[in-house]
Amino acid sequence: MAADDHFAYIFAAELHERLRWFITLRWMAVAGLAVGSLVGPRMGLESVWPSLFVVALFVAAYNLYFSWRLGGRSGQERPLGGLRHCAIRQMVMDLAALIVGVHFTGGLQSPLLPFFAFHMAIGTIVLSTRLMYLIAGCTSLAMLLLYILEENGVLRYHPLDPLHGICSRACYLNMVSFVMALFGIVYLTDSVTGRFKERNIKLHEAKAALQERTEELQQLLDEIAEVEERKSHYMRISAHQLRSPLGTVKTSLMVLTQGYVDPGSERGRKLLEGAIERVDGLLRIVNDLLELAKIREGRNRAPWARGVNLNQLVADIFDAVSPLADEREIRLVPLVEGVAVLDWGIPPDLVFALENLVQNAIKYSLPGGQVTVGLRVTGGGEAVLTVEDQGIGIPEEFVEQVMDEFVRAPNAKAHAAEGTGLGLSIVREVVEAHGGRITVRSVEGEGSTFTVTLPLHHRPPEVEALLHDGNDGGYQTPTGS
Ligand code: ADP
């Protein structure tokens, strides 16, 4: 039944088609009844005119009504329940018309009797078996009642053969075989079509599953195509970033080797120093690219740890960046509330990311400025880390882009020549690998605030599986608590 409901729209379409087909068949029955009522009297059956003609008109009237009801909308747009009710109503009307027809054509000797079998078989195909047994029972009772009323003279008997009266007691045997035939046909039709119905449902289930898989596959293919596109875009901009410093270095070396400038002269020395600076920049880019690749390669292979204490991590970073802050005359201010411990984390990556944010804040601050590093735990089980500075800020049109690879705002380039534009991309990757998010608020000339939110109880599914196997990640340093 559940599958039945699941595929209701398919069954509705089928039932709708059948019902329309029955309407066509019924027009034939109308014609047959009308012809029978006209021809019957010539064959000695006086009772069929005009009685059968009236029955034909009655059948034509409700057939018109049902054909109007079934017109318009397609089967799939109709509720299955409504179509089933329509089928039951048609069946009841047909049987009623048939019983009246039988009454005027000889009762249990009527040539119309086989049509009951026809209705039982078709009914069992389109309606439920239980309902069909009920209809077979009611039809049997109605026929029995008709026979009793005819036999007792309450209803006039219309014999097929005018010379004969109502067919004696033997007709009770006819009655028994009639009832058996009705039930037998329902039973047989059900046992034959039951299997088809089951197979039909299974077929539809398989079809639906296949469609689902196809959609999933298509989605995967789309994702792969998107990743491929991102990858080639990334490679293109990486190559571009590497090409221009390499070109400059090559030109400097050519000028020197081809004797245009003496390497021992002041100009030659400057050219060599410039080349070294460019190579340093290239190395920084290559190192950052390697770091980014390492993070993207997968966290289950990274040295992760359970219970990563962020307070400890912030303290370590403070120690590490203090010399740089002193050198640039920047005041470092901690603002720590509570203790934040992550269930799971990759300490070296977290150190890299947070250090990068604090180093940026120092790098893009003016001497005498202040950098505040905040850490607090929310009621929702998240650690919130903020790095706030009063430095050069980010131009409005760059705020959205600064976390993309190789993006450097013009004011940052003017303020600090060295920089790869890859640091924030790495930070974002690290934060997302820990199930967190990073946002930035900034006003050019006033300062910036980077906010990292990390869920305390996050564990990637692949790590969950490793933990289940007793793997502990293997990270052993003071940052793991
Ligand atoms: P890099 O610092 O090497 O240029 P990042 O990826 O770390 O690369 O930063 C990307 C860009 O974001 C920077 O070039 C700069 O324009 C902007 N930015 C990052 N942090 C700050 C900050 N604290 N203040 C102002 N601008 C920043």
Image: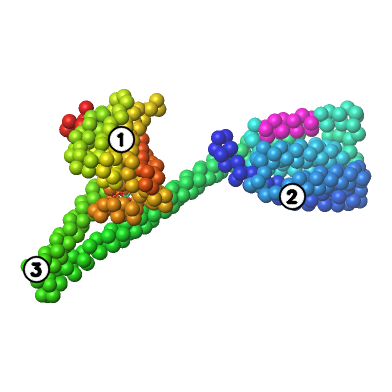
Q: Hey, what amino acid is under mark 2?
A: Gly
Quadrant in which the C terminus appears: top left
Classify residue 102 as left or right of residue 13: right
Which quadrant of the figure has residue 177?
A: top right
Distance Cα–Cα, label 3 vs label 1: 47 Å
Circle nearer the N terminus (3, 1): 3
Distance Cα–Cα, label 1 vs label 2: 74 Å
Circle nearer the N terminus (1, 2): 2
Q: Hey, what amino acid is under mark 3?
A: Ser
Q: How is the image coloured?
A: rainbow
- Front: mark 2 or 3: 3
Distance Cα–Cα, label 2 vs label 3: 98 Å
**Is the residue at mark 1 in contact range of ligand 1, meaning its CB lies under 8 Å from it?**
no
Question: Residue reaching furthest left?
Answer: 264
- Crowding near pointer 2: few (<14 within 10 Å), some, many (20+)? few
Q: Which residue is mark 3?
A: 265
Magenta range: 131-144
Tell me which secondary structure the magenta stretch mostly adopts: helix
Point 69% across, 41% down: residue: 83
Q: Which residue is mark 2?
A: 71
- Front: mark 3 or 1: 3
Relative depth, front residue between 252 and 233: 252
Residue 289 visible to an observer of this rendering: no
Point 79% across, 43% down: residue: 112
Relative depth, front residue between 360 and 415: 415
Question: Residue reaching furthest front?
Answer: 368
x, y (%) of residue 80?
65, 40
Quadrant in which the N terminus appears: top right
x, y (%) of residue 195?
55, 41
Q: Which residue is mark 1?
A: 372
x, y (%) of residue 454?
34, 34
Which quadrant of the figure has residue 255?
A: bottom left
